[in-house]
Amino acid sequence: MAKRKLLLLPIFLFPLVVILSQCLSTKEVQDPRGEAYAGAKTCISCHKDIGNSYPHMAHYIASSPATTKTVHGNFLPGLNSFTYNDHTKVVMTKTDSGLYQTNYVNGQKVETARIDITMGGVKGESYLYWKENELFQLPVSFDNTKNHWIMSPGYDTVIASFDRMINLRCMECHTSNAKTEPGKLPSFSGDAIGFQKGSVILSIDCERCHGGAKQHVNFQTENPTVKTAKYITKISALTREQKIDLCGTCHSGTQTQNSKSIFDFKPGDKLTDYKKHALSAGPLDLAHIDVHGDQLDMLKTSKCYISSQMDCSTCHNTHKNERNDMALFAQRCQACHKTANHNVCKMADKLDAKVLQAKCITCHMPALPSKAIVNEKESVLIHTHHIAIYPDEITKIKAYIKKK
């Protein structure tokens, strides 16, 4: 009997040993950016107010997994297609396995791909799909302002292409991390770019702007009574140039050449160590910069910037959704532009306060068509960051005053 018990003992112990070994071998999932990073979910556990507001910010929705919550186009029959031309139509469908775009030529299915990633979501959103380890843009995007499907920017009306490859520059401004590797698909040139899927961090997260937070998290967790933030970059502590350079990693234009990946940029670094204007870009003037992605260069050509110490955070609170609140932005303009400073709007005495607040941004920072985001049928309008007097807007204001 004793011998039988001894034989049974290993049988009962074996599951326990397996469970213990699994527990002991389980490691904390490391952020793909390295040991210095804690991950945005860790930040939210303490910064709950920001965690509630930030998901509505343009930075947060710069990229996201494609779901019915992040793809806002209509998938109902009759509303789920976009016609390229008399022969070509792309149809958007929803199945148990995901969301898809399918190209039909003369009624015949030619190509289909699953929508894997949503890029953007404020004025519009475009979509990417994985093919092996390479990313490609899909032919149909969505206009959030007009609530309908549109042809993806830059495509022509001849063919609904599924082979526009996404490069590192796209990912640097729309994600928080993405490590490149050689593409796995056959390529004539042999230099196709692929991405390590496990390295991709969608959205622009906390640590993209504040730097790695692991040491900060460890210290504050171990010292809960210390309310002063330690071992983390406080944006307010940066110099004006450092703040501008940080925003400029993404908002300094498409007419630039990178000397090294922007993903390596840390708060406090010099932007010129990472990217410089391409020689082919021409002089820094309004003819060579665009309302999309060139906000920093546009701001630098503005008298407001040149004559003050303003930076991006003077007008923008990156933790709160203040989008389209023209009165709030006007108040920030009027913090400097007031009678006491002798630089108030010359039409202020002809406009009541409500109208003045409503027109402050639309008049001096009007929404202009982007030269970078274009398609054959529609223009994308984005507020310029070149703060100035625009004759066309002045004409509109004068017409409004006459009608009063």
Image (cartoon, grey):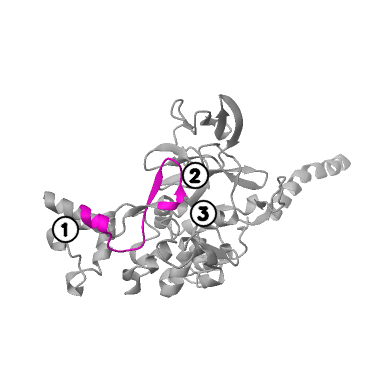
Label 2 vs 3, first from the N-terminus:
2
Specify whether residue 18 is in view: yes
Q: In x, y percent, where is residue 197?
A: 64, 50
Marked residue nearer the N-terminal end (1 or 3): 3
Looking at the picture, how far across and down is residue 95, in whole percent?
55, 30
Q: How crowded is mark 3: few (under 14 residues within 10 Å), some or many (20 or more)?
A: many
Viewer-proximal residue among 36 and 363: 363
Under circle 3, the secondary element is helix
Left or right position of 79 against 222: left
- In the rendered image, is residue 226 in sight? no
Magenta highlight on residue 379: yes
Residue segment shown in magenta: 370-396
> Which numbered disc covers residue 353?
1
Residue 235, horizontal then vertical, whole percent: 43, 69
Q: Going 49% across and 64% down the picture, which residue do you hit?
A: 209
Amino acid at pointer 2: Ser
Q: Are marks 2 and 1 in contact (CB under 8 Å)?
A: no
Amino acid type at circle 3 is: His
Is residue 71 within the magenta segment?
A: no
Which three-letter amino acid code belongs to the residue tagged 1? Ala
Identify the element where label 1 is drawn.
helix
Q: In which quarter of the image is residue 37?
A: bottom right
Residue 288: x and y in percent read: 44, 61
Instruction: Tell me the residue that label 2 is attached to.
Output: 126
Q: What element carries label 2?
A: strand
User: In 3D space, how far apart are the residues under numbered discs 1 and 3 (Cα atoms)?
Assistant: 38 Å
- Taking the image as shown, residue 88 lies to the left or right of residue 134, namely left
Say the numbered circle drawn on residue 388: none
Which residue is under mark 3? 174
Looking at the image, tell me whether mark 2 or mark 1 is earlier in sequence order.
2
315 lies left or right of 249? left
Alpha carbon of mark 2 to alpha carbon of mark 1: how far? 39 Å
